[in-house]
Image (spheres, grey):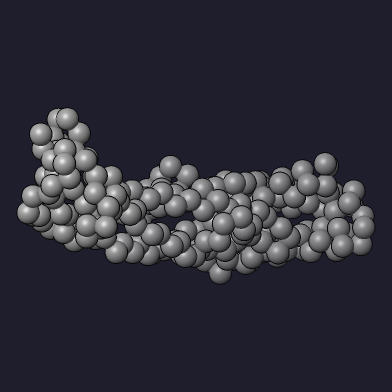
Amino acid sequence: MWTGQYSVDDGVTWVDLPASGVATISAEVRGSVRYRAVDAAGNTSRQGSQWLKIDRTAPEVQVSGLTDGTAYGDSGTVTVDWTVTDTGSGPGINPDSALLDGKRVARGATVNLSGLPLGSHTLTVTAKDKAGNTTNRSVTFTTTTSFVDLQALVDGYRSAGTVSAGNADKLTTSLGKAAAAAGGGQPAEAVGHLTTFLDQAGALNAVGARTLLVRDAQALIDQFDR
């Protein structure tokens, strides 16, 4: 009685075929698989070989533009990018994609952080090679606000003409007084000036500017109330 055997390491070790005569190779192979038959006395047949390439290694993904665990002020922007390398079968068709908080984002996209809610966010990049091996790489970060961020947003709206110079000056004055009070250890006074800022921002005609400045001012007030 003969038993079939195969080897994926150039004949160093041999594995018996199961009774079905069909072997499932789980190891990664890039080269020849040898096969032979052996009888009960240990006699072996002439070896044959079949060249195989079995890719079990998932692609590697490196994300740039965002650092895991980092807090970013919401007045800024980040450029979302990533690289995918695969030494096996190579990237497949439409090999990679990314989701920011569940929404598709393109490679190289510039993200205005002010457009994201304050708090935690996750970017997940998914890469797949031609063999179907998949890698998911996630980066979690947070967006925050501060006196500096609020002033930067006001300055940006002024430069764009979204907020008039007169209204921008009023906002800047209130914000400056709030920051000075906070720096001087006077939280109640800081909240009072921030409330004035919030009222001024709430009276703006530009909906986008009004919504964002009110949101951030309220977030700073909430920090003092904790």
Q: Is residue 62 visible?
A: yes
Q: Position of residue 74 (x, y in %)?
A: 60, 57
Tell me if 33 is positioned left or right of 112 in this view. left
Q: Position of residue 69 (x, y in %)?
A: 61, 55
Q: Is residue 203 visible?
A: no
On screen, residue 107 above or below 200: below
Q: Position of residue 52 (x, y in %)?
A: 15, 55
Residue closest to the eye, 167 or 157: 157
On screen, residue 51 above or below 23: below
Q: Residue at x 49, y 65 (%)?
A: 65
Q: Quadrant of the C terminus?
A: top right
Q: Residue at x 27, y 57 (%)?
A: 12
Specify the farthest residue to the right: 185
Tell me if 64 is positioned left or right of 172 in this view. left
Residue closest to the eye, 139 or 85: 85
Specify the farthest residue to the bottom: 159
Q: Position of residue 180 (x, y in %)?
A: 85, 63
Tell me if 148 is positioned left or right of 191 in this view. left
Q: Residue at x 20, y 34 (%)?
A: 18
Specify the farthest residue to the front: 41
Q: Residue at x 40, y 63 (%)?
A: 82
Residue closest to the eye, 30 or 46: 46
Q: Quadrant of the N terminus?
A: top left
The image shows a total of numbered marks equal to 0
Residue closest to the eye, 42 or 149: 42
Q: Which quarter of the picture shows residue 46?
A: bottom left
